[in-house]
Image (cartoon, rainbow, N blue to C red):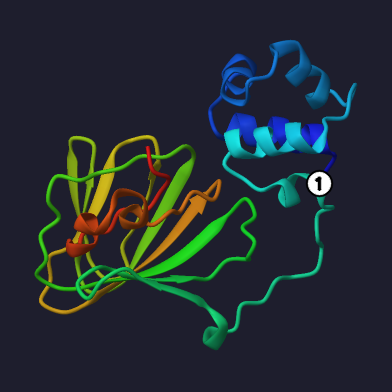
Amino acid sequence: MQLGKKIRDLRLRRGMTVQQLAAASDLSKGFISQVENEHTSPSLATLQDLARSLETSVAYLVLEEDQVPFVVRSKDRRRLSLSVNSPGIEVLSASPRRNLEVLIAELPAGVPAGDRRHHHHGEECVLCMEGRVTLTLGEHTLALETGDSCHFDGRVPHAFENIGSTTARVLIAITPAAFEPVSLARGTRAATNGALEVGSVV
């Protein structure tokens, strides 16, 4: 995919207008349109501004699409554990991130969700692999048993909680890739709670 088409595709997936991307990257609306239509080539510094505004990397924008499958061996998965009681996160998708992110989260039992929710651009689909969890999604509270799945708009504020007596495992797919550990961005206070928040920090 050409650079301009990649930028347009990511902008649309993020739910951004040309004007919003221009404002976020401190560029003109006309320049963004020229880049998207392959009428001009941005400098490296401009690419960095665009990548930051689109929540991606310069490498993703400029590298050719790799048709070779990216294999993540079980022993090589990136594992994130933010505290003793916080969810353990395993990253199943490619690194550096592409346009889809797939995670497995292990949620400890008996830890309340609290009031913290998050939202992000794009879509999310979750599968309860083991245990029983609740998904608080806007005004809805959904109970997911083992084998149940839910597909929803990531822009709706949401959070997970393990309501069972054993550790729950949840498979999470996000597009475009948006995962960022909230506790790393908001401090250690968030890491003491076992509720799962997956998405970009807003």
Q: Quadrant of the C terminus?
A: top left
For the question of whether residue 134 can be seen, the reply is no
The residue type indicated by label 1 comes to Val
**Where residue 103 sits in the image (x, y, percent)?**
45, 65
Task: Please name whichever residue, 12 or 30, is drawn nearer the observer in this view of the structure.
Answer: 30
Q: Is residue 145 left or right of residue 65?
A: left
**Where residue 47 sits in the image (x, y, percent)?**
74, 36
Task: Please name whichever residue, 90 or 84, is drawn nearer the observer in this view of the structure.
Answer: 84
**Where residue 40 sits in the image (x, y, percent)?**
89, 24
Q: Residue furthest right?
A: 39
**Residue drawn at (43%, 45%) of the image:** 200
**Residue drawn at (75%, 44%) of the image:** 61
**Image quadrant assignment for residue 140:** top left
Q: Residue furthest bottom?
A: 75
**Is residue 57 shown above or below 89?**
above
**Is residue 185 shown above or below 41?**
below
**Residue drawn at (60%, 38%) of the image:** 52
**Where residue 58 sits in the image (x, y, percent)?**
72, 46
For the question of whether residue 78 can be seen, the reply is yes
The number of discs equals 1
Q: Residues within 10 Å of mark 1 (few under 14, many from 20)?
A: some
**Residue drawn at (69%, 39%) of the image:** 48
Q: Quadrant of the N terminus?
A: top right
Task: Please name whichever residue, 115 or 47, is drawn nearer the observer in this view of the structure.
Answer: 47
**Image quadrant assignment for residue 195:** bottom left
Q: Say which element carries label 1.
A: helix
Provide the residue designation for mark 1: 62
